[in-house]
Image: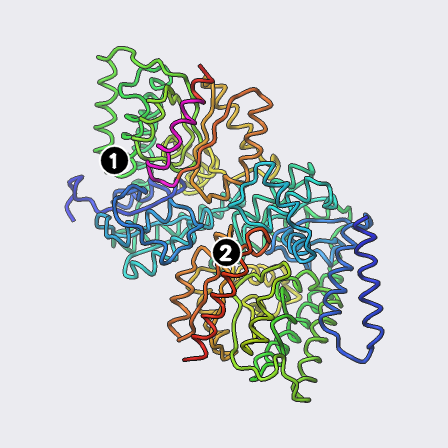
């Protein structure tokens, strides 16, 4: 049933793209890739792996494994308005409401039998303790083998080597389960594609930095996280190129992402995944544009095709959600300068210890460079806890404060 | 710095994976920063409300200057909350010597080797802070000393199981707290005194035997509460209890830090450390320990917002249910009041066991 659902969704998006073949259609191409990935997860053809966010998906793509981080499923459920029953299912099974909704919804979905059965799982200690625990639960639930990547916090040579060695062991683990050894040429091509996509994304982000920005508060939702799933494939290149072309065309034609853009905002960490009116409110009533998301950035160096595991290890360690808070704040400050931001919104996702845990430190860090932060108390996954009125009031007060500066 | 026990400089730590023996070998007293304090709640300015009350309480102590002089602090990257408190500590006490050691979530050979390198990094930092290189002999001596403490604690635990420890589990926790924060010699004296007192005392306790597991529970008054409800805590698996005082397994041949690393990573684990080949084995481990010590029920006491435990408790509940081992789960916030509020539940649980 799920396979058919995603297959139909993919066909529908494909048809829409074909209606406007000359347009870049970046968001549609991005949606098409995610629908195709989702249908492959349920197709029962390729080996399927569930993973953590820091898993090198380009390597798995090169090994013919269809994979995604489990939070991808949680986000998909929430964005389609289907997460609440699964959250409830997990809660009834004893998974407390204080834990992360991304993880709870996945546990609920697995218990309800709507998660496709994985062939194996690969957990990563980055970004959070909850993520690795949910994979341990899923490994137990599906009775499948679990591999763990320990991602150290500091990017020292010793730590990079430790993670690179683990990635090498991961290759042996995957090959053991798929019965297919790693094809070195295929990996080289995958790494080259990752590097190409990386370069295009870097250009695309530079274009998004223009004042006024060609992007708006919706175009790049979840982009920086989800694109990682397509690295090593043509799909990542095509999507990144479509965004770049779209932004180039908008700049050349004087089209602004948000007409008469007045305020430029940064969204920290996760977006609210279910339908909500906050972005509309910001754009329509205040001409405030979310031009940057924390995770929409290139934070890693190109990967050397002759030494791919080292490059992948560096990339994982460099993730903004993995490094210490002082480094993460430096990254946020860099975004604030590059995007000429007026303010930042930090949705303190209930249940996220690693991200929102340091709410005050992030506020202080951005305040240092004169960028005010609005901390919103929100559960990015759970509509049951969405206090629209309160959030609206707080956003309005924040934007009015920014306007008066 | 003089060498009398009271004047030995202290190094703070806040996690049971911190290598006390290395701190001791470097000439410092390992000082566990316990979440027990009357200082006002200020950590919320830096850390979110939904973060572990344990780390917020110890940060309160840092902000409220409710700490002895520390020559440095050793943090362990054991969970999100520990990572964040280290970040916040850097902001609150910017001039303090601080190190964060990465701790793998598993304990295979590669993880053990990696953590050994982290321990070497700590040894280097401690040497830098003290101006004195730590000779291997000193590490060996500290291991022998702390293993001796663990051995004495094991003897006390045996008496506790038999109901023959004067003062019961509150007294035991008081000894743990002292040994976590005091110089070795002082701890040794206290433990010897406690053992000597055993000889002259008669059996005393007759509560219902209960196995207690969880993360942080350091206040002896909490144990008094359990006992006043009719429970007799005969064994614990807490990071502020027995877990910290389990002997390190050392033999003559292998690299010393590698052995310390292996011992720390393989002793009774916090929920955050697991064996991927046996997912959620923690649940079976708890059941086995409860059955082995003769407990009639199990109390799980965890700190609010602790993901490593919260996400694994459903399996613990299910495993114990299937085995017919009664379980009471309590959630605390490092404040005695929060446990006091659960007195009725504890009493009902013990009555049910009786």
Which label belongs to residue A159? Answer: 2
Chain for disc number 2: A
Magenta highlight on residue A156: no
Q: How is the image coloured?
A: rainbow
Chain for disc number 1: B
Of B49 and A356, the residue lying toward us:
B49
> Circle 2 — which element?
helix
Residue B234 in picture, x, y percent from top left: 39, 21
- On screen, residue B10 versus residue A97, left or right, reads left
Magenta highlight on residue B344: yes
> Circle 1 — which element?
helix
Of B111 and A105, the residue lying toward us:
A105
Q: Which residue is mark 1?
A: B184
Of A285 and B308, the residue lying toward us:
A285
- On screen, residue B246 versus residue A232, left or right, reads left
- Vertical side of A17 occupied by B16: above or below: above
| Gap in angstroms between the C-alphas marked 1 and 2 | 33 Å
Give me the residue at 50% from left, 44% from top.
B307
Q: Which residues are magenta?
A: B333-348
Q: Look at the magenta stretch and give its main secondary structure.
A: helix
Quadrant for residue B87, please give it: bottom left
Residue A64 in picture, x, y percent from top left: 76, 55
Which quadrant does the C terminus of chain A fall into?
bottom left
Mark yes or no: residue A347 visible: yes
- Vertical side of A278 occupied by B268: above or below: above
Mark yes or no: residue B251 visible: no
Residue A109 in picture, x, y percent from top left: 68, 44
Give me the residue at 37% from left, 19% from top.
B230
């Amino acid at each position: 049933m799920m396979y058919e659902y995603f297959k139909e969704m993919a066909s529908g998006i494909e048809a829409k793209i074909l209606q406007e073949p000359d347009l870049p259609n970046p968001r549609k191409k991005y949606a098409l890739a995610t629908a195709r990935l989702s249908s492959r997860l349920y197709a029962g053809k390729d080996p399927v792996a569930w993973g953590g966010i820091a898993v090198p998906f380009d390597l798995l793509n090169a090994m013919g494994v269809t994979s995604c981080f489990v939070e991808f499923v949680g986000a998909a459920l929430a964005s389609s308005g289907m997460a609440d029953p699964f959250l409830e299912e997990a809660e009834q099974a004893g998974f407390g409401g204080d834990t992360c909704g991304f993880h709870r919804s996945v546990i609920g979905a697995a218990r309800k039998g709507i998660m496709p059965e994985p062939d194996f799982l690969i957990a990563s200690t980055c970004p959070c303790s909850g993520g690795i625990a949910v994979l341990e639960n899923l490994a137990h639930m599906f009775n499948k083998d679990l591999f763990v990547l320990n991602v150290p916090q500091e990017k020292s040579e010793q730590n990079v080597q430790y993670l690179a060695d683990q990635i090498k062991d991961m290759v042996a683990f995957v090959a053991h389960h798929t019965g297919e050894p790693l094809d070195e040429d295929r990996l080289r091509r995958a790494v080259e594609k990752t590097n190409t996509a990386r370069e295009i994304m870097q250009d695309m982000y530079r274009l998004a930095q223009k004042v006024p920005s060609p992007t708006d508060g919706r175009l790049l939702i979840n982009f920086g996280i989800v694109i990682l799933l397509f690295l090593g494939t043509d799909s990542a290149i095509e999507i990144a190129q479509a965004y770049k072309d779209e932004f180039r065309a908008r700049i050349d034609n004087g089209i602004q992402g948000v007409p008469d853009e007045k305020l430029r905002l940064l969204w920290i960490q996760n977006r609210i995944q279910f339908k909500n009116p906050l972005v509309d409110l910001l754009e329509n009533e205040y001409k405030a544009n979310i031009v940057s998301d924390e995770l929409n950035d290139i934070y890693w160096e190109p990967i050397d095709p002759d030494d791919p595991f080292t490059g992948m290890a560096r990339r994982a360690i460099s993730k903004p959600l993995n490094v210490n808070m002082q480094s993460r704040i430096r990254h946020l400050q860099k975004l604030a300068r590059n995007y000429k931001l007026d303010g930042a919104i930090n949705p303190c996702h209930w249940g996220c210890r690693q991200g929102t845990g340091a709410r005050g430190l992030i506020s202080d860090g951005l305040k240092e460079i004169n960028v005010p932060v609005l901390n919103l108390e929100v559960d990015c996954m759970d509509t049951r806890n969405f206090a629209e009125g309160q959030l609206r009031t707080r956003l309005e007060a924040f934007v009015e404060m920014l306007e008066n500066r | 710095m003089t060498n009398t026990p009271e004047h030995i400089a202290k190094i703070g730590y806040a996690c049971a994976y911190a290598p006390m023996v290395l701190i001791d070998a470097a000439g410092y007293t390992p000082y566990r920063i316990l979440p027990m304090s009357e200082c006002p709640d200020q950590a919320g300015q830096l850390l979110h409300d939904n973060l572990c009350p344990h780390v917020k309480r110890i940060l309160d102590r840092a902000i409220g200057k409710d700490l002895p002089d520390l020559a440095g602090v050793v943090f362990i990257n054991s969970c999100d909350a520990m990572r964040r408190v280290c970040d916040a500590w850097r902001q609150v006490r910017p001039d303090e010597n601080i190190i964060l050691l990465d701790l793998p979530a598993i304990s295979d050979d590669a993880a053990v080797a990696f953590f050994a390198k982290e321990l070497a990094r700590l040894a280097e930092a401690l040497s830098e802070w003290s101006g004195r290189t730590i000779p291997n002999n000193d590490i060996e001596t500290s291991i022998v000393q702390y293993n001796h403490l663990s051995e004495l604690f094991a003897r006390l635990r045996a008496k506790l199981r038999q109901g023959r420890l004067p003062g019961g589990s509150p007294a035991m926790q008081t000894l743990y707290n002292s040994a976590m924060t005091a110089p070795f010699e002082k701890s040794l004296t206290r433990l010897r005194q406690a053992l000597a007192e055993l000889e002259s005392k008669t059996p005393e306790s007759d509560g219902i035997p209960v196995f207690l597991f969880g993360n942080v529970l350091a206040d002896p008054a909490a144990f008094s509460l359990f006992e006043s409800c009719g429970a007799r805590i005969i064994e614990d698996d807490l990071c502020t209890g027995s877990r910290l005082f389990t002997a390190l397994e050392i033999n003559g041949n292998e690299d010393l830090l590698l052995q310390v690393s292996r011992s720390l990573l393989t002793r009774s684990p916090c929920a955050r450390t697991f064996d991927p080949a046996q997912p959620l084995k923690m649940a079976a481990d708890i059941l086995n320990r409860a059955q082995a010590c003769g407990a009639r029920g199990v109390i799980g006491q965890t700190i609010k917002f602790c993901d490593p435990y919260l996400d694994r408790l459903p399996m613990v509940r299910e495993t114990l249910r299937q085995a017919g081992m009664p379980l009471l789960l309590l959630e605390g916030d490092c404040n005695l009041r929060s446990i006091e509020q659960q007195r009725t539940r504890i009493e009902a649980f013990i009555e049910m066991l009786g």
